[in-house]
Each structure stands twice: as C-alpha cells, then as structure tokens.
Image (cartoon, grey):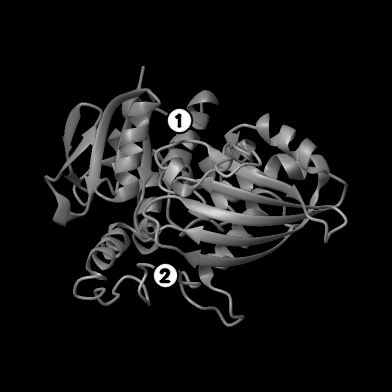
Amino acid sequence: MGYRVAVVGATGNVGREMLNILEEVNFPVDKIHAIASRKSIGVDVSFGDKNLKCEDIEQFDFSTVDIVLMSVSGTFSREWAPRIGAQGPIVIDNSSAWRMDPDVPLIVPEVNPDAVSYANRKNIIANPNCSTAQLVVALKPLHDRATIKRVVVATYQSVSGAGKEGMDELFDQTKNVFVLGATPPKTFPKQIAFNVIPFIGEFRDDGYTDEEAKMWNETHKILDPAIKLTVTCVRVPVMVGHSEAINIEFESPLDEDEARDILRDSPGIVVIDKHEPTGYMTPKEAQGEFPVFVSRIRNDPTLENGLSLWVVADNLRKGAALNAVQIAELLHERGLIRQTALA
C-alpha cells in the first residue's frame, strides 16, 4: 500500500523536482497533493503523466497525509512545519529553519542514515544546504578511512540556488549584454552574466557569509564536529549545478589511487577522473543526474597527508529534491512512516 504525500511549495524549482523525482524513483504513492500559497491556487504542476491543481495550504487538512516534502522559505517553514508535524505526518524540510535544531535530524542518507531514529521528536527532518549535501557525500568515505583534520572549500554555485528569479536574471543579462547592455541586477548584488560573485547570503561579523557558515555548521552536525572547515562561496553564471574545489588534510596517509578506489565503491558517487582534456565532470553534464560526481583526485604535495578533489552535482536534485526523496525512501525502508491517514 502506498502513502499519501503532500509537496508544499510545489510551484517552485525544488518543489517541481520533488514531484518529478517521486515519480522517477517509483516512490510508493497512493495519493499526492501539490500545496502552495493562496496566490498559486489552481496552478497546474506535473506528477508523471498527471496534472495536479495546487491546493491552498491555509485550507489543507494535513492529518489526511502521511509524509510532507516541503520547499519554502525558512520563515514560512518555522511557522508551518511544527503545525503540520503536530497533525501526524513527518515533514522533510528543505529550508535552513530546522537544520541546527538539536531535536531535528539533519540527514544525507549516504552519510548519516541512523539519525532518522529521532525524527519523531518533532516530526521534522531537515535537508542540508545544497553545497553541504554534495560535500559530505564525497568526504564521508574518505573520513572513514583516514580521518579528516581540515578541509578548504571553494564553491562555484549556480544561479538556480537563488530560485527562478536568479535563473531569469542570468538569462536576461546574458541576452541583453551585447545589445542594450546587461539589465541591472535585482536578485544578485552585482551583474552575474559573464561574471562571478564571491558573496552568497549575508555577511556575518567575522567576514564570512551565512552561506559559508551553513556549510561548516551542517558538516559538523552531519559528519564530525572535529573537522576544521573553511569555505568561500561563489555564485557563477551557470544555470544548474554546483561545483566545489576541495582540499583535504588527513590524520593518516591516503594516496590518490586508494582514494579513487574508495570513492568508486561508495554510495551516491560516480568517479570521472581521467588525465585527459575531457576526463572530468562539469555542472552542465551533471544537470538532471542523481549522483555526486568526483573528478581531479590528486595528491597535495604541500601537505603531509593531503588530497585535492573536484566535486559536482545537480543542486536541484542531490542538493535538494533528490536528497529529500531519499530521506522519504529511508523512512519507508525502516518502517518509520506512520500512516496516520489510514488510522
């Protein structure tokens, strides 16, 4: 028997991907609802070959569903996730609102699946930041083998991380730059077309941004609080797909050949690493794909036990919607979805 599922934020980029992936992986769905704010009532979204009419969150009875996948703002989630969870279903939330709550598991299924055991404390499970998700998938098997001391990361994050508005801004600026000149920035602080912006989120007092802080805080919660991590997050003129240049220092020796073998045998990872001009992955090639791709694996001769990697993933999929669906699959496999609608 399938589950009754609701996708909240169904008209957004990630909400639509959640619907797509639920259908692609044949998640056991008995009934599905597309939920959105009042302004989107009646908007059509797709679920396989079906069209779903968006329903009003204010009027929807969440006690009639078993599991809720939510992709909304943090402010919206802080209001609605506890209200929904109190009615019975487990909420898998894609916002930043609950990630650091000690009573809410923050899960990447390939990395810390056992954290799902305390999901019932608030009936909320948090999805990590898109850049964190692909990072910890790549780090986990290497950490298990040689214990990571320190990581230095530079991200190259696509505009889809800023939603449809970010994608539209890149498209419009690129289209106009050679005609009337690039349109003025609205979503981003500076022109994104033919440019890179070393700033995502808001500045903190220490000079880092909150996007950068999310990555180290979430990595500590998901993987290991002892890992030292420093990050520079950069927005790049790519529509979909985040990339990361990662430098790792280990406690124990680990050479590139063994690392390559370990990563090849690890869940959720595909290694594309040949010493030739096309022997690596780019964000364009990762678009629409499920795995985290690892390339450019090489020893770092400046460290006693160091490696450098290039990691790429579709941020709308593994970085958001796919990870949420994988959490739902994990709950299903472990028998942790209470079918409240049928009680």
Q: Is residue 162 above or below residue 140?
A: below
Helix, strand or loop at label 2? It is: loop
Q: Tell me, for residue 195, which label it has, or none.
A: 2
Helix, strand or loop at label 1? It is: loop
Q: Is residue 205 above or below residue 93?
A: below
Query: Percent x, y for residue 285?
Result: 45, 41
Horizontal side of residue 7 vs 337, given as left or right: left
Measuring 61% from the left and 31% from the top, which residue is drawn there?
267
Look at the image and tell me whether residue 105 can be seen: no
Image quarter (top left, top right, bottom left or bottom right) of the N terminus = top left
The residue nearer to you, when weighing 58 against 114, is 114
How dense is the environment of label 2, judged by Cα within 10 Å: few (below 14), some, or many (20 and up)?
few
Q: Which residue is mark 1?
A: 337
Horizontal side of residue 229 vs 35, given as left or right: right
Instruction: Locate residue 181: give its quadrant.
Output: bottom left
Query: Percent x, y for residue 311?
Result: 58, 48
Query: Percent x, y for residue 128?
Result: 52, 51
Measuring 64% from the left and 54% from the top, which residue is drawn there?
219
Q: Which amino acid type corresponds to the residue marked 2 in the rendered image?
A: Asn
